[in-house]
Image (cartoon, rainbow, N blue to C red):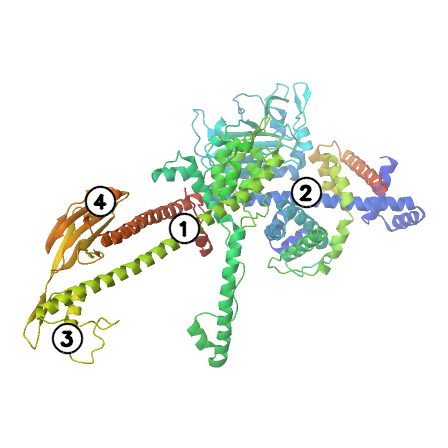
Amino acid sequence: MEDQKIIELIQSHKHDKVFTALYKYFPVVKKMVLVNGGRAEDAEDIYQEALIVFYRKAASPGFHLTASINTYLYSICRFMWMEQSRKQQKQNFVEIEKETLSEAEFIAEIEAESQFNLAEKVISDLGERCRELLILFYFHSKKLKDIAAQMGYNSENTAKNQKYKCLEAAKNKLKLLKSM
Amino acid sequence: MRKELELMETIENYINGKLSAADKAAFEKKMQADPQLQKEVQLQKELLEGIRRAAIKQSAQKGLKKYKLNRNLKNWGLTGLTAAVLVAGSVFLYNSVTKSPQHNNAPNELPELNEQGSRLWSDADKYLPLQSFELDPEKDTVVETQDGIVFAIPAHTFLDAGGKPATGTVQLEIKEALKAADIMKGGLNTRSGDKLLETGGMFYINARQGDASLKIDPKNAIYAEVPSDEEKPGMQLFEGKRLADGSIDWVNPKPIRKDLIPVDILSLDFYPPHYLDSLKSWGYDISNKKFTDSLYYSFAALFNYEELAAKEHARQDSIAAVEAALAAEYAARMERYGSAAVQEHWGKDYSGNASGDTIVRLRGINPAKIKAIWDAKYQNTLLATREFEERLQYIHKTCDAHVLDMYIDNLDKDLCSIDSMVAQSNGVISMESDAVYYPGYPEFWKFAARGDGKVKNGEKNVELLKAYYRQKSKMYTEAISKTANEFWGKQKDLDNTAEGKRNEQQSKDLQRNAENFKQELELNLDEAYRQLGKKRPAPLPASPYGLHIATTGWYNVDAYVIQSTLTRTTLDYTDPETGKKAVINYEPLSVTIENYKDYDRVLVYLLPDELSSFQRMPNRNEVFEEELNELMRYKLVCLAYKGDRSFYFSKEEVGKGKLSVSLIETSDKDIEANIGKLSKRSQSRAMYDELRYIGFEKTEAKRQQQLVKIKELTNKIRPVIFPCMVAKTDSAIVDSFGADARGF
């Protein structure tokens, strides 16, 4: 899939195929992490975070590509892995021969995302059905009617009610965590 | 809706900008007055972000899984694995679930008979959407379902009614219920009898050819990987039994993992594939484990990278020095003559100074690692099983030390989990291999499919064993490399000693020849003067052969005699004044040795009574020939050696002509005694010296033969041990192969 197409799909909230396509840029990141003392799992984690950061950037209104997605993702991963290595006081960073962007291109998104880890954890800890429901509605923008049919709720209204109950549970948990 | 929920809806609409202008203004006004409301709004905003993040992660994980699978499929393609073709009709059927939900709850059309040949169908059969694949049962196939169950289906696993592997296209039917919604929709419960089960997902799989269901060969089972966020211990596989009321009872639980039965680890074969076979076919005794071990482990010396690196650096330094000098010269010439001419002449651009770390890391399993694990310490672990022995053959074939490391690093896990790790290669950087990116080893899926678990009540101290492995493999590498270095160092010393002895012997030969010549010349001169009836003048001091010929005299005679003695040709001289003649005849003797070719070495000596030492007869095409001086009486000694055996012949009086000698096996002691009796003292002393030297040469030859054997064997066995090594080895490897084997 071409870069422009990927951006269009993200901006029109058609994500189904986007992520599989985005993983084609993963190997070079994996290599970068491996040669710099990380494990494959580290590479997967960092790439996932980079996808979220990139997604935030790409979905923001008025975004247009200034470099290839490959370069974007690699630059973000490189930045994050260098940060992590620095914190662990690891030795020199070994560069993979690859073009990189300056931090200014993505630092705002990285910082924004870092605020939402707690909320994400709360959502992830919800029961599977709750999580599924919220994701279908809020992320995939599915209609309540379809969600009800797909998940076996009796009516649209039940689904809607259930959705807010789930959201409420999450909100209470988040409140609790924040007050601690 | 409750009040709290209604508030949440309003907040949500506010965040999404869905409030009317009036409502929005009112809401904002309310918010300004109510800090609690502000906080609620903030929390809800955060939650939406959290949902977004969770959703992206979910999609990303799916993406990663697809990506890995696709990659494995690609890799698998090399080993003949094919992806099943999704049958077009069922794609439509499946996709229609989301497109037109109103059909969603309509029952599927089912074939008449189920996989057990009965007419009983459950609600799950009716309501769960069918995913149908077509595959070629004679090929390895991987199938991934919509929700991510991966089935690795080995070739020939499907058996027809007659129990024979099916051929031709097979239809694979899969239904899955991994999500709570699907489980409910299928009317599935998670009960076994009256016990409640925790489910990790349910699926139905059946293969058909036409209307007939196929059986799965239990010895060649299908590997199913059900996606799960966490691995729960004690999961079991249940068989579904359809009940008359349309529900399913889960019966006949089987542990997903099979226990391993440990055997004596020392009774297993951890060598690379074909190692023992090859040695056996070359006539080596493979029951001698000491020999097979020491030969195999000797290759660990190749993995002593620190030492290799040191050597390489020394080499690089000297290269760098030469290149720097060349570069300077090159630059000077460029300035003087211009680039084209210089480059043509030099052939290489020396302006860039080439250097860098060029240590070649071997692609292969360090035998020291095998030595470390092939040890009684690992009894009662998963290494001490036939199952691991079988995998090790494949591990050797990957030539990737990291794969072996994975098995030891995960000693406490189920064998099949490690198999699947290797297959997908969640690789880490390996210190012993230059590859940092592991493409994965899909051939290990077949092992993963067997569901091999761990040794029941196995060794618990795995952490110690892991540490032991790291330590020992390093230690063995160093120790073996040290032994190899010592061995080859000693050989080098012995080479030097031999070289010294050879030089010494050579100078002795020269001395003897000079002495023999002097003595024979004296004899010949005396005789020549006697025949001419002249008195022999006293020789000029310190210059025996006619250099100082300032005056006329008898130098003419001397010159002829010297010439004849030197070339060992007959002297026939006529005195120009007196007309008298001086004749000394040289006549040929040739000695042939019967069965010459049977001996390793043959030496023939002449012991002239008139000389204080012996003469070695030159060997010309297996015939020993010499010109005999008629003034001298010769004795003949022939020696021959074959392996450790010595052969001897001697004759008191030999004269011109041809002699054929048949040697008799004689002990070295008797040879000495015979020579002692035969010859005068000065000669036997020289001969003893010669015999000692021959003895030394004999042991030396044996040593050299041994070394050649070692080198031949190591060169021959090397590609068996390291199948991935390129035939043309890099110099670093060749250098280290100087130290490739130690004595055994």
Secondary structure at badge 4 equals strand
Q: Are marks 2 and 1 in contact (CB under 8 Å)?
A: no
Q: Looking at the rendered structure, which numbered label has been put on residue A93?
A: none
Q: Looking at the rendered structure, which numbered label has been put on residue B647?
A: 4
Task: Locate residue B194: give its quadrant.
Answer: top right
Q: Whole-Å distance between the Cαs marked 3 and 2?
A: 117 Å
Q: Whole-Å distance between the Cαs marked 4 and 2?
A: 88 Å
Q: Residue B317 at what x, y percent from top left? A: 52, 63
Q: Earlier in the sequence, mark 1 or mark 3?
A: 1
Q: Which residue is mark 3?
A: B554
Q: Which residue is mark 1?
A: B491
Amino acid type for the residue under numbered disc 3: Trp
Question: In this orientation, does residue B363 appear?
Answer: no
Q: Which residue is mark 2?
A: B58
For the residues carrying marks 2 and 1, which lies nearer the camera in this image?
1
Amino acid type for the residue under numbered disc 4: Phe
Q: Earlier in the sequence, mark 3 or mark 2?
A: 2
